[in-house]
Amino acid sequence: MIVQNKYRLMSNELDPKTDRTQIMVYQIRVKGHVSREWTDWFEGLTITLKDNGETLLTGPMIDQAALHGVLRWIRDLGIPLLSVTYIEPDQTNTTEAKQTQE
């Protein structure tokens, strides 16, 4: 019985409806411009086209599996991956403001 409680407490399951603090926001930078029509393919991430020919894919990921799913799509499409950045929760609004200005 103690073992069951131990594992229940150590669960990695996230419930975004009850605990939004656990959702992580990532910014993925890729080479080339990705069409905004692909938003659904990229799990609803915001697509920002940069003047330097790069694309930023920014948004919340429910867990690491979701992040890896997006990275797998990027790989399968042959899009060169430049960086993946975790955005601290208190920086989310600042980062989004910077993206809209660029």
Image: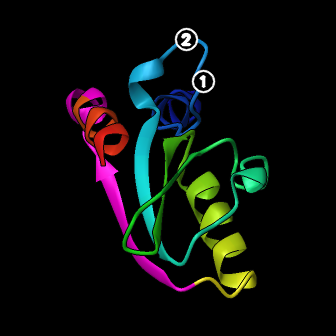
Q: In which quarter of the image is residue 92?
A: top left
Residue 65: quadrant of the picture: bottom right
Per the model, the C-alpha gap separating discs 2 and 1 is 6 Å
**Along the viewing direction, whichever of 84 and 4 lies nearer the viewer:** 84
Q: Few, some or many C-alpha atoms within 10 Å of disc 2 (few <14, some 14-19, many ≥20)?
A: few
Going 58% across and 22% down the picture, which residue do you hit? 16
Q: Helix, strand or loop at disc 1?
A: loop
Q: Nearer the viewer, residue 2 or 33?
A: 33
Question: The N terminus appears in which quarter of the rendering?
Answer: top right
Q: Give the range drawn in magenta.
A: 80-93
Q: Which residue is drawn at 55% across and 30% down?
A: 8
Helix, strand or loop at disc 2?
Answer: loop
Residue drawn at 37 percent across, 38 percent down = 100
Image x and y of residue 101, in percent? 29, 40
In this picture, residue 96 sits left or right of residue 7: left
- In this picture the colour scheme is rainbow
**Circle 2 residue:** 18
Q: What residue type is labelled 1?
A: Asp
Q: Does 9 sit left or right of 99 as displayed?
A: right
The residue positioned 48% from the left and 17% from the top of the image is 19
Tell which residue pokes out farthest to the front in this image: 51
Percent position of residue 93, x then y = 29, 27
For residue 77, above or below residue 7: below
Q: Where is residue 3 in the image (x, y as percent from the top left)?
A: 53, 36
For the residue carrying disc 1, how many other residues have a C-alpha within 10 Å: few (<14), some (14-19), or many (20+)?
A: few
Q: In this view, does 49 lie above or below 77?
A: above
Tell me whether the residue at label 2 lies in contact with that at label 1, contact meaning CB atoms closer than 8 angstroms: yes
Kind of residue indicated by mark 2: Thr
Q: Residue 18: which quarter of the image?
A: top right
- Is 43 displayed left or right of 48 in the figure? right
Per the image, the residue denoted by label 1 is 15
